[in-house]
Image (cartoon, rainbow, N blue to C red):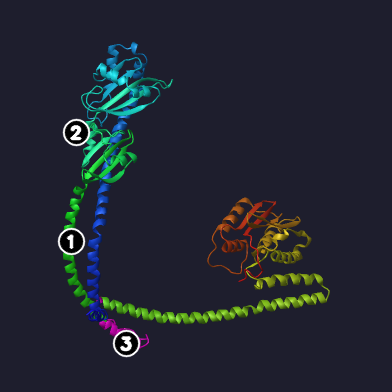
Amino acid sequence: MKRLFRGRMERTWRGSIRSRIFFSILLFLIIPFLLTFYYIDKPLENAIERKIGDAAREALSQVNFNVELFLEDMLRSAVDLSMNSSVNALLKNPGQFDEYEKLRIKDNVFNKLFSSYFNTEPYIALTDLHGNWLSSFYMDQSLYREYTGSEWYAEMLKRPFQTRWSVHIKTYPYADDSLITLTKTVTDLQTKQNIGMILFSVAEQDVRKYLAKLDGEVYMADEAGTVVSSPAARLIGFNVREEPHMEEVMRNSRGQITTVRGGEKWIVNYDTVGQAGWKIVQLIRYDTVFREIFDIRKVNIMIVSVIFLVFMFITLSISYSISRPLKLLNKRMQEVEDNGFRSSLSVSGPQEISTLLGTYNKMLKQIRELLQRLKDEYEQKEHMRFRALQAQINPHFLLNTINNIKWMAYIRHDREVGEMLSSLGSIMEASIGRDGIFIPLKQEINYIEHYIALMKLKYNEKLSIVYDVPEELLGCRVLKFMLQPIVENSIIHGIDPVGRQGEIAIRAWSENAALHVSVTDNGIGIRKDRLEQVRQWLERPSPEEGPPHRIGIKNVHDRIRLQHGERYGLQIDSVWNEGTRVSVTLPIVAGEENDYAD
């Protein structure tokens, strides 16, 4: 039975393209559909939870921002009071003010404080160090003594510029409503000594209006876990420190966690009010959030089911409409294959098939052109290779001729001409390319010696050269013809324009695992603006195409960087009418002569 079923499946899969399309869509649509519903439920729930959490955190952040502004306005008002000259004078010398003057201070200072954040009038009280107080509202003497006798009050008076945030439930210290109080020391700016205390209080309901904008259970708690404000008045004054989520809330500044409370799952968002260090906590029931998700899931199942049925019907239609013209295309393409790709297909049929046939015809044409181009390129490369081999005959012929003339000069006892031809032959032999890209520094200096010998034909004793190269560096590998362009520049552009004795010094040394070679002349030098142009020209990237026969310091600089990287190359320093120094920096490389040959 299994063998019969497998045989039918193989015949179906190997059958027409219409059967393949139909069964492929059935197979690859139903299985992913079932797997999607099996595995997508939890990721979808997590994604929606994150989205809802992000929205809740954003709303909480906005509420926290408003509470911050509210507390900042309280602090600003308290600072303004502490800086008021009348208030400072009253606290320093209370005996100099009678009741009328104190009443004037209340009217001119206390009652003129205004803020758009305060819906109710703030409660303000001043206390000095002499047992006197001045309040915008009546405060019972017993409550005043209880307040000033507290331990934290005495601690604040010991240090200047102190602030303390607190909440007072009901009648403490001087109002019937719960108050949020900022206590601030009044400090003399000259002596840095406290002269009194300001109590700036606002009704808790002014803060409550911001918390009421959040969904769920919301409250603001102080460092001890006592609720200082909440839309639910029953929570104010209640300590929530033992709640399961409060340990993490107190440990972090902001975030979102999931907790179990009363047997139910809750999402907890929290943030920290920077001014007071209090925590704004929002708790939302988990089931309340995901009730909408379950409803959306049912709707999605219905929609996907309808789409699946419609898609199956469309699949049958598409598979038939595609397979029929493709069978015709297959037949016509076999005819082209039999003709060896030398004939084009007739463009006909539906628009898509016609486009496919036209594209196929273009492809055949491009293939034929490509084959012809490959054939032409192969012939051209063979021709260039032949010319390159033939071109090597001319330099060898010239080198052999120069050597013959040199020996004739020696035979005729014309030693000077023989030595010049010997130097010219050595330079030409090096240019033919018998050595590799790299040669020993000793051999490079040998080329310079031959080149200087030729230059002395023109300059005679006006030109001299000195070498300062340690023996241990002569075996270091350097680029071939690295120094010759530099020495040539020194002679033509440096020494030739001046009338004095010309001297070139070549010095080599090692430093920081690098080989340094300098070529210094006492020629005319380079002007400062021209030197800057030359340096910029060296750093400028070389064009992709250019005269391959031209060799100069730019060529040397680019070859060094191409072989060794941006750390290496040429550095030019010059002083007008004193001379020029070109420094070459290379990595220290030692090895056999043929190690770096092409």
> How far apart are the alpha carbons under marks 1 and 2?
44 Å
Q: Amino acid at mark 2?
A: Arg
On screen, residue 83 versus residue 486, left or right, reads left
Q: Nearer the viewer, residue 40 or 116?
A: 40
Q: Amino acid at mark 3?
A: Glu
Label 1's element? helix
> How far across and down, in percent of the image, does residue 572 sit?
63, 55
Which residue was labeled with disc 1? 301
Q: Residues within 10 Å of mark 2 (few under 14, many from 20)?
A: few
Q: Which of the 4 quarters of the picture holds residue 96?
A: top left
Q: Nearer the viewer, residue 256 or 448?
A: 256
> How far across and down, in percent of the image, does residue 441 sit?
68, 63
* Point 65% across, 52% down: residue: 574
Which residues fall within the magenta stretch?
A: 327-351
Earlier sequence position, callout 1 versus callout 3: 1
Which residue was labeled with disc 2? 234
Earlier sequence position, callout 2 versus callout 3: 2
